Image (tube, coloured by chain):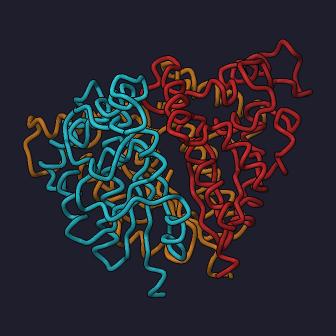
Chain colours: A red, B cyan, C orange
Amino acid sequence: MAENKKLSIIAFSGDFDKLTAVFTLGTGAAAVGYEVNIFFTFWGLDAIKRKQGRSFTGGRSTSGSLCSPKNWLTKLFGFMMGGLKVTPTSRFNFLGAGPKIFRYLMRKNNVATLEELVEAAKALGINLYACEMAMHVLGLKKEDFIPEVKDVLGVASFLKLSEGGQTLFI
Amino acid sequence: MAENKKLSIIAFSGDFDKLTAVFTLGTGAAAVGYEVNIFFTFWGLDAIKRKQGRSFTGGRSTSGSLCSPKNWLTKLFGFMMGGLKVTPTSRFNFLGAGPKIFRYLMRKNNVATLEELVEAAKALGINLYACEMAMHVLGLKKEDFIPEVKDVLGVASFLKLSEGGQTLFI
Amino acid sequence: MAENKKLSIIAFSGDFDKLTAVFTLGTGAAAVGYEVNIFFTFWGLDAIKRKQGRSFTGGRSTSGSLCSPKNWLTKLFGFMMGGLKVTPTSRFNFLGAGPKIFRYLMRKNNVATLEELVEAAKALGINLYACEMAMHVLGLKKEDFIPEVKDVLGVASFLKLSEGGQTLFI
């Protein structure tokens, strides 16, 4: 039973509300003794980017020159995926007003905001992983992420880690 | 084996098609003897609201006056999340025509509609829970929900309930 | 332990990026010896359609004449859900440019494209299933799908198949 207390989350979405769900579930589980693994992939990688706010990260792979479309395109994605501060909500985003309203309501109603939840996740020792394949596609490197990211994993390694527990795709 | 027959669903989405998936899976599982727990959170709370149709529910917390922005904002969310009858589809919504087309096709093809599935869920004794945190954010109270909602739960209690079974995030 | 190595995926979304996640997880798991079951439902059925590109499939049920609105509506859905080649991304779709950019980046960065992943899934013997209920709603028949689709299943049969392993809803 003790070894069953494991929660693994594949954080695919970069939406503010879904990332809030990822970290609420993760910190809630860690707080009652679960081993928690979060595997960030695709848009979810946004949540663990070191440089917050819109910036042209990515596209620095050595396999092409700076002017190749590959590098410009990954930079463009880097700009659009601007980290936690600019994540949209999956519904009622209203050009960015949605997340602001949410943050306001969360603060007023004494609910931890997304940024506080991320801090709590670090403090609770939740294991944060980045998806190797998505990093290749988006031209991101381990240095682009916050230092708390434990490792870069492929699917097989993540499946091995999550074995015997509950796994959610968010 | 017998104790493995448990399906728990975190119903996060308020989309018509995803809620249909929640209730199709839930009733399908309950019909073959599974214990089924559905934990409604964020937009998913829409599915269990007592007052259907757009209305200004929520925002009646005692911690602020009626005119505070907090209360107006939660009322606004209450209006936008108008319950089952006005949920959009996640794709091809066409300003509300999508769900109407779906309902039409479901009726014509003898598939249970979302409302019928919700009724079936109640009849099959599926456990319906509301997420405490999301209720705080959206200013909703237990009285805002249908009486079949068994309890208001936090993450830890839900994880405990879902242990040893399958858990889906929809 | 050996019998635990099972991954079941409910592929609900028809988005290019989410279908990529479905097949990346599926092929990754199958490559390390997992039994993999993918249950396509709603928009996800798009991924296993035989006729790729936009076409008016569906709506050929015998229970109504060709001119009935039911048949026209299912044909319309058939047209809109045009198979893998026209699936949008869940974010940054830009009227279809999003998937093109993704395909370009995947090719340049030596990551398998969605079409290659589907081929790999077939080669690795992943079990592909179609959801009976969604087929009824959308007016699709088994002949509309690629021959690798093993069976048409209801919820109960899928739950039985996925018992004792991990299940994801994507």
Where is residue A168, by image quadrant?
bottom right
Q: On the rendered image, what quadrant is the N terminus of chain A found in?
A: bottom right
Instruction: Relative to C139, say whether A16 is above or below.
Output: above
At horizontal 42% and vertical 71% (from top left) the residue drawn is: C159
Q: Is residue A109 left or right of residue A68?
A: left
Q: Residue at x 39, y 39 (%)?
A: B139
Q: Residue B108's spot in the image, x, y percent?
A: 12, 48
Left or right: where does residue A145 sit relative to residue A170? right
Which residue sits at x=58%, y=66%? C7
Q: Nearer the viewer, residue B64 or B84?
A: B64
Q: Looking at the image, which residue sits at the far top?
A: A67
Q: Residue B43 occupies which quadrant of the picture?
A: top left
Q: Is residue C33 above or below residue B39?
A: below
Q: Position of residue B39 (x, y in %)?
A: 41, 58
The percent coordinates of residue A58 (x first, y second) are 80, 26
Q: Is residue C36 visible?
A: no
Q: Is any part of residue C156 visible from this angle?
A: yes
In this image, C166 relative to C42: left or right?
right
Total count of labels: 0
Q: Name the residue: 7% across, 42% down.
A: C65
x, y percent for residue A146:
82, 38
Q: In the depicted view, which residue is nearer to us: A168 or C120?
A: A168
Which image quadrant for residue C126? Answer: bottom right
